[in-house]
Each structure stands twice: as structure tokens, then as C-alpha cells.
Amino acid sequence: MADAASEAPVAAAPAKEPKEKKPKEKKQGDNSKEKKQGDGSKDNKPADKDKEKTAVDISDPSAVHFSIDKNADFAAWYEQICIIADIVDKRYPIKGMPVFKPYGFYMHNKIMDILEKEWEKLEIEKAQFPLLIPKNFLEKEEDHVKGFEAECFWVTKGGLNDLEMPLALRPTSETAMYYMFALWVRSFRDLPLKVHQTCDVFRYETKDTRPLIRVREIFWNEGHTCHASSQDALEFLEDVWKAYLLLINGHLGVYGLRIRRPDWDKFAGAEHTDVMDAVMPCGRVLQIIGAHYLGQKFAKVFDIKFLNQSNDFELGYMTCFGVSTRLLASTISIHGDNKGLVLPECIARFQIVIVPIVMGKKATAGESPIDKAKEWKQVLMKAGYRVTLDDSDKKPGEKYYYWEMKGVPLRMEIGPRDVAANQVTIVRRDTGAKITIAGDNVVTELRTHLDSMVADMKVKSEQFFNDHVKDVNSLDELRDVVRNNGGFARFPFHSMGADAKESDKIVHETCGGEVRGFRPEEQPPPDGTKCLISGLPAKYWAYAARSY
């Protein structure tokens, strides 16, 4: 299914992305060869501000005071924070296949855990399908193979022997799953059939890669269903969207535009494709959800039919949907600041970091800030919080910079005065606000402050998104909004079919973006409204933006 991912410090010499034929070890933090990151719809030129920056020396990440202006140079900010915050390590010698480090992988898995709980509520059962897909499976659906054949990695040998048929590392799982669906579905009593898997897929991405956004090994969750009617399939997709929005808006505090792709940009083999595009800090947009109504096309190709209640055979109605590490990428990007990560507590490896502050003469045993910090760690862990204690010999300021860069939501400071007064001081990562809490209230008040922080992050994120959807009435306004304001420009448009592809080219020539889609539930332009591009009668409100 369509990817929702296909990717002041001390200066160090930039290093290059691993080459295909002669891979060499490279320093992390390289941004020297990064260009525009897209989602496969257009080969846009990079924004003027996405320029080369020198790398950060992370030989000792805890000693680095991260300070890159996210709004002035988002590309450099994103590249460096993914590395210095221990989300990925790019030095593995295959382009587009960085190592997902424990700190980053924890966050991705928390997102998947939240999603899988929602799938349980919708009775979508978890399965695991083979990684290898026979070539003739991919060739069964003509549009599908056109969309993916050039992106496949192919296995042609087993040991030293040539295989009778090449096997693809799954670029997506429709063909593998639907071969089995045909064996599992016999009667209307077998429907709906609903499965999902959390796995990795592989795409031979030839453009410049970017961690979590444009990569060759994509970690994701994909769902696939078969229904007895089109109505049931479409209603179920709406339930899927409710779950996605709960995850993205409710838990991650990320907001975006749900739109339907034009016919020339929909998922290969789908009747229609609905997506969510989030606005990144640089003003470009990133697809973070893909959900597709497949109709009966794949059912016909794979002979997925059932005996209906009239005792006649009928083809199934199919859907597929998925999200990837782009959810994590958008969360990092939208909430982060010039100091580093700002994480929603639901995915943070540590919700709280405890920093004891020792000054002057050491306190007597049992009264030292370090001993008290250790006690608090045990108390908070027992209460269900994810906690770490930094009792290293670094100065308090160094510890503050480090854990701010790592995005830990709350910092708990315990100094001699706090010990004497039976209190703690907490600092919110998002605002820097300091709050003193009496010892008896710490366990309950920490939850209050975590919830308050998430609520404030949501408000800020939603406002940022709303500020980046603008109506335009001329080509000059279209150019200005897309290139300077960033985000989406909304304007009347004559068609979302193949006949509008030439008009989309004019959009691209005008602003460097493209028509991302339309909102099916939105009322069409009033009668008599002309398309901004062609002058023909307008039937849709189109949303144009530049892809990341």
C-alpha cells in the first residue's frame, strides 16, 4: 500500500552519504548532499533555505549544546537532531538504511502500540506475512506493478543456485496478502476479513534519502480488509480514520489536512486514495497517512470471491491503509525547537529526568540530593512513570542542555533546599516554566503537568497548521502563499481527473508545488466560479503545496 514514508556546536567536516558500490564509513550529521525530500508525486527543487550546513561533532553527545534555528534551516535542524538525539545512526554502509537506535525505536514502537490497541477495538487481527513476494504475484495487477516494479529489491539466488522466479522484498503487501485472502474467503460468513501487520517494507529509493521520511527500509503498520459490500468497506474506512485521528491529534498532537488525491496521483490500483498531509516547519507538506478504497480490482485479479446470501458468487470489496515512521518524523519536526526535541509524553522513552544538585559541602548520609533523587526514582517508577536519574559528575547546566535536547517532558531538580523542605522543583520542556511541588503531592501533580504540557502542545500545533491553509484568488497569490507562507493554497479547480493533469503542471510552474487533492465532504465552489488555472467551470476546491 502507499507509503506514508518512502524518509553553535563544534563544527566537523561534512561527510557523504554511503555510495552504492564502494560504501565507506561516514561521520554522522552529514547534510552536504541532502536535497528536496518528496513523497513521490513531483521532483520539486529544494527550497532556497534548505542549504548545506556543517555537521555537528557528536563524539560526546552529552557535551553538545544543541542550537540550530529550526525555522531558519529546518533541513539542517532535522538531520542533526535525528543523529545527536540518538534516533538513528546513518553510518551503516547502505544508502537509505540507517540503524534505528534504541531511543528512536522506542518512540516508533510506542506509536505502533497505541495504534495496535485501536485496531483491536475495530477487531482487526494482527498477522505476519512473508517478506518475499514472487514476481508473478506483483504482475497480476497491471496498475499495481507499474507503480512498484522499478522500486523493488529482487532476490534472484538461493545460496549459489539461481531461483526459478525472482522474489521481491515486499514493497507493500497487497499481493502477498490477497493470494491468501482468496484461500480464506469462501462465504459471506467469512466477511469482513480484517488483518494488519507491523513490519518493514523495502523500496529502492533512488532520490536523496532522509531519516524516517525517505528511506529504503520502511518501518510501518499496514492494514488490509475484505468486505461483502462497497458500503461496508467505505464505512469501515471511516472507522479507520477515526482511529488514526485519535492517534495523531489526540496522542501525538499533530494536525494535518485530510484530502483525496487526484486520479493521477492515487495509489496504484485503487479506486480512490485518501491521505493526510502535515505541514512541516519549512512550509513543505509531508504525507503521513494513506488509506485506499480498492473496490473489486484486486479481488478480481486474485479471485477473492464469496458465496453471498442469495447463493451467488460475488467479488469482495477491498481496503488498505497504513502509516510509517513519518508519524514520528512529523511529531519530532512540528514540536521540536532550537534546543532539540520536545516530545509528547506518551511516546517519550523517559517522561521525567531527575537531576540532583549538589553544592558546597556534602550533606550527611540520607539527606543528600543524590540519595533523595534515588528515592524519588523508585517512588515514581512504582507509580508507573518512566524515569531516569542523571547522577553523573557533569555540571547541572550540562545535564540540562543534554536532556532538553533529548526532549524529556519534565525535569525534576532536587537540591539541598528541596531536600530540607521536602519538595521538588520541576521544569517543563516546552515552556521552561519552573514549578515547586510539595513532596506529598509529587506523584499526582506530575501527571497534571504532563497532561497540561500535551494540551498546550496541541494548541500550538493546531494553530501552526491553521495558519498554513490560505485561500488564493490569483496566480500571484498562489505563488506567494506556497513559496513564502508555506503550507496549502486553496483555490477553485475544474477537475480531479486525468484531464486536469496539464493544469497541475501549470500549478507546478507557478509555485513549485502541485495539486495535492481535494476534500470530498467540502461544498464545491458556487455556480459560475471559474477554475483559477484553466478558466473552466470550477467543480472542486483544490489544495496545492510543495512536497517535502
Image (cartoon, rainbow, N blue to C red):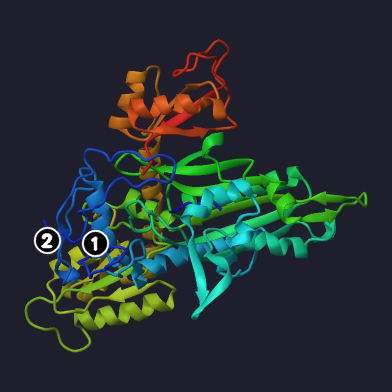
Residue 482 position, x and y percent, is 34, 30
In the rendered structure, find residue 72 and report the number of the disc placed on it: none
State left or right for residue 520 relative to residue 112.
Answer: right
Taking the image as drawn, is residue 513 in sight? yes
Residue at x 52% of width, y 62% of height? 114
Residue 467 position, x and y percent, is 36, 33
CB of mark 2 within 8 Å of CB of mark 1? Answer: no
Residue 533 position, x and y percent, is 44, 19
Q: Which residue is mark 2?
A: 13
State left or right for residue 166 relative to residue 471.
Answer: right
Helix, strand or loop under label 1 = helix
Residue occupying the far top of the picture: 528
Residue 158 position, x and y percent, is 52, 77
- Please name whichever residue, 264 or 361, is drawn nearer the observer in this view of the structure: 264
> 157 above or below 171?
below
Q: Amino acid at mark 2?
A: Ala
Q: Which residue is mark 1?
A: 404
> 280 above or below 405?
above
